[in-house]
Image (cartoon, helix red, strand yellow):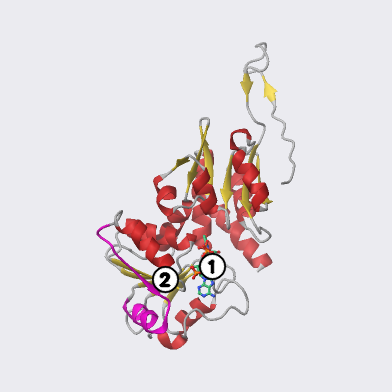
Amino acid sequence: MPSIKFVRTWWPRKPGRRRCKLAESAFELYGIFGHPLAHTLSPVMQEAGLKAAGRKGFYLPFDLTPADYRKVLASLPRLILDGFNVTVPYKEWTARSIKHRTPEAQAVGAVNTVYRRGRQWVGTNTDVYGFCRALAKDGHFRTQGKKIAVLGAGGAARAVVYGLAREKAACILILNRHPERARKIVRDFQRLFPKTKLQASALVPGTAKAALNEADLVVNSTSVGMKKGDAKLLQAVWLPRAGTKPKLFYDLIYRPAETVFLRQARLKGHRTLNGMSMLLYQGAKAFECWTGKKAPETLMRRALTEALQTHG
Ligand SMILES: NC(=O)c1ccc[n+]([C@@H]2O[C@H](COP(=O)([O-])OP(=O)(O)OC[C@H]3O[C@@H](n4cnc5c(N)ncnc54)[C@H](OP(=O)(O)O)[C@@H]3O)[C@@H](O)[C@H]2O)c1
């Protein structure tokens, strides 16, 4: 773990009063834990947010091995950070290690944001909010009563299904390479959301083709499409033509900006949305958890867009 010597500044509340009455940090320190972390855009986005909000602060990436992250979790009460994010592969582990969790974090079983409330650390999951806000605001999609196909059953898919069911989707079919993971999501969430019909299936041609035909919204929450040379998740022939009723295809991946999944959908005339706005809104929500202030979203979005244009 990088070693940071962090000196807090002490000064009297009023001139002439005894010193050391008030402890107030000269600047704020946030960070993100994950492994690997080379390409994270969170520092650019969060430091732009802090600057725009007139706060003195830093947001640092901590690329830690599991052994080092274990030490961080074990020494939380003494951690000098004011708040932090957690990303792959530590979200589930953090959820199991933090005593105080929000209902989202508890149900999803993953924590991506940790903030202080008094002397306690609280773990939450802002991916749920980020996904739903992006879907409504940038995807112009109203979830209530809709049929949805979710591809994938990892940590992100759990946040997606939780958010969609909370927004009263009529039915959600989860398709995954290993269908037992999809069935676990159904078991975990069906009793929480009895009005949404949850179903699980293997990601195989027949079921996938039927699901793509039926769904109003198709979400890719697998990691397929991030790397050049990734095999296609779907065959183009499985996708119906949009005709008069275009569907929304939403990929949580934002790098590349247009994955094969989104390109296939666009070429058939459907609407598409990538994961950049979800990244923005989950980060904005984390900012609000840490600072208690509204996040300067416009400037955070601009910083993200510029970073993506510069680094691809
Ligand atoms: N935009 C955002 O703010 C945001 C936030 C969170 C996550 N994400 C993105 O969401 C994606 C998933 O993240 P995660 O945390 O859920 O990862 P994860 O827990 O590792 O899950 C990966 C998922 O991808 C599936 N998968 C991997 N390789 C596959 C292949 N070759 N064929 C079919 N399925 C395959 C896995 O299926 P199996 O279960 O069968 O292995 C699993 O469902 C990542 O691309 C991540 O960057 C974006």
* Residue 244 shown in magenta: no
Q: What stretch is highlighted in magenta?
A: 194-214
Image position of 159 (left or right of 68): left
In the image, 53 versus 111, the foreground residue is 111
Residue 241 vertical position relative to residue 167 in the rendered view, above or below: below
Q: Mark 1: is the Cβ under 8 angstroms from ligand 1?
A: yes
Q: Which residue is drawn at 42% across and 80% down?
A: 204
Residue 46 in percent (x, y) is at 60, 49
Name the residue at 66% across, 14% down. Answer: 15
In terms of secondary structure, where does tag 1 sit? loop
Residue 263, x across and y down, in percent: 51, 80
Q: How many marks are shown on the rendered structure?
A: 2
Query: Which numbered circle lies on residue 179?
Result: 2
Say if residue 247 shows up in the picture.
yes
Q: Residue 197 carries which label?
A: none
Residue type at mark 1: give it.
Ile
Mark 2 or mark 1, earlier in chain: 2
* Place of residue 22 in the rendered image (x, y in percent of width and height, measured from the top left): 62, 21
Is residue 297 something that shows in the picture?
no
Residue 205 included in the magenta stretch of the image: yes
Amino acid carrying mark 2 in the image: Pro
Disc number at residue 253?
A: 1
Answer left or right for 113 relative to 186.
right
Quadrant hosting residue 24: top right
